[in-house]
Amino acid sequence: MSVAKSVQWDFSKDEAQRQIVKMTMELEGLPALMERPVTVEQICANGFDERVIRTVLSALNRLESPAVEEVTPGHYQWVGEKTGQRDLHGFEMQRRWFHLKDAVRTGKPAGTLEPWFLDILTDAIRVSARELAPLVVDFVKTHIQTPDHGIDVGGSHGVFSETLLPLGHRMTILDLPFVVEKVRPTMTNVHFIGQDIVKQPLAATSDPFGFAIMVRFLHMLGPADMQALAKNIRPAMRQGAKIVVVDTMRGISPNADVFGVHMSLNTPYGNTYSVEDLEVAMGLRCLHVELLPQLGYAAAVFRIAE
Ligand SMILES: C[S@@+](CC[C@H](N)C(=O)[O-])C[C@H]1O[C@@H](n2cnc3c(N)ncnc32)[C@H](O)[C@@H]1O
């Protein structure tokens, strides 16, 4: 299969920036002090060094999304909530990479989906989901032509479901209970299911799903998990339903090898997979696959094998 090269995710990008945001947020007393506009002199009176704090404030003030604003000349205020979650997520990703030397011996990830991590993950990936959504919508439009009932497995923040509504689809977001609790109050036009789909099956209903989307989801699972997932969603899917997968895929995405290591560090069984791996693990038949010209994701449409 021949595919064009795409942009590769650069893990080292903005490393120092993330560290500055993370470390500053955790400096005892500083964020609270900067809830109101303060001068450098007022900050230093609380035990901070003037030379270093000036450089830190200046850097935080010049970020693409500033964490500190100079609200009036010489008065600085912390506005980091606007950007904080994405930086915290980036920082945590880097921290986990330093544990590779342990993981290759123990086989254990450096961290998993604890609620505090799901919290920052959901907010951080919402940002990149907005960039990716138009490509996902175009792909779905091409392959699911009539308005239908869809399930967004690992739908998280709901950006993909929301952007599919104008095509006439009705959408249900399935995610872990903690994530659904966080996102449900922000969206009224979709249905939610909060459950671990690897552990618990969906019930058959009178309104089965005509299609499923799994965007950046399958890399979190191992082959046995994917087998369980396929079995667990099947009762709720209409016969002949299609499954749209958008993910980092081996054989297509330029960074699939490195991202596979990343998933070893972040999940107990996760990895990146080829189209053939997914067909075998989930009992699917691939109808079409292509490289999306953004972040190296592949988009594929499958049908559940009869
Ligand atoms: C990497 S995020 C992707 C979110 C979204 N689809 C996107 O691309 O922006 C994976 C999502 O899958 C959810 N998830 C992971 N394992 C799950 C499981 N076993 N059952 C349900 N949801 C799960 C996580 O909570 C998370 O929201």
Image (cartoon, helix red, strand yellow):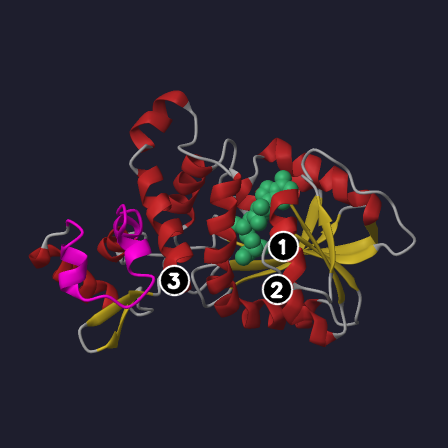
Residue 83: which disc?
3
* 3 or 1: tag closer to the N-terminus: 3
Q: Is residue 192 magenta?
A: no
SS type, badge 1: loop
Tag 3: amino acid:
Thr
SS type, badge 2: helix
| Image point (67%, 64%), residue name | 187
Q: Is there a contact, CB below 8 Å, between mark 3 and mark 1?
A: no
Label 3 C-beta lies within 8 Å of the nearest ligand 1 atom: no
Label 2 C-beta lies within 8 Å of the nearest ligand 1 atom: yes
Label 1 C-beta lies within 8 Å of the nearest ligand 1 atom: yes
Q: Is there a contact, CB below 8 Å, between mark 1 and mark 2?
A: yes
Task: Give the image location of residue 26, x and y in percent.
Answer: 30, 47
| Residue highlighted by disc 1 | 155
Give the distance between the C-alpha atoms of the residues marked 3 and 1, in whole angstroms: 22 Å
Tag 2: amino acid:
Phe
The one of 252 and 230 positioned closer to us in this rendering: 230
Task: Give the image location of residue 28, x and y in percent.
Answer: 27, 45
Task: Give the image location of residue 270, x and y in percent.
Answer: 51, 37
The one of 148 and 57 positioned closer to us in this rendering: 57
From where the camera sits, is residue 249 visible? no
| Residue highlighted by disc 2 | 160
* 1 or 2: tag closer to the N-terminus: 1
Q: Which residues are magenta?
A: 22-47
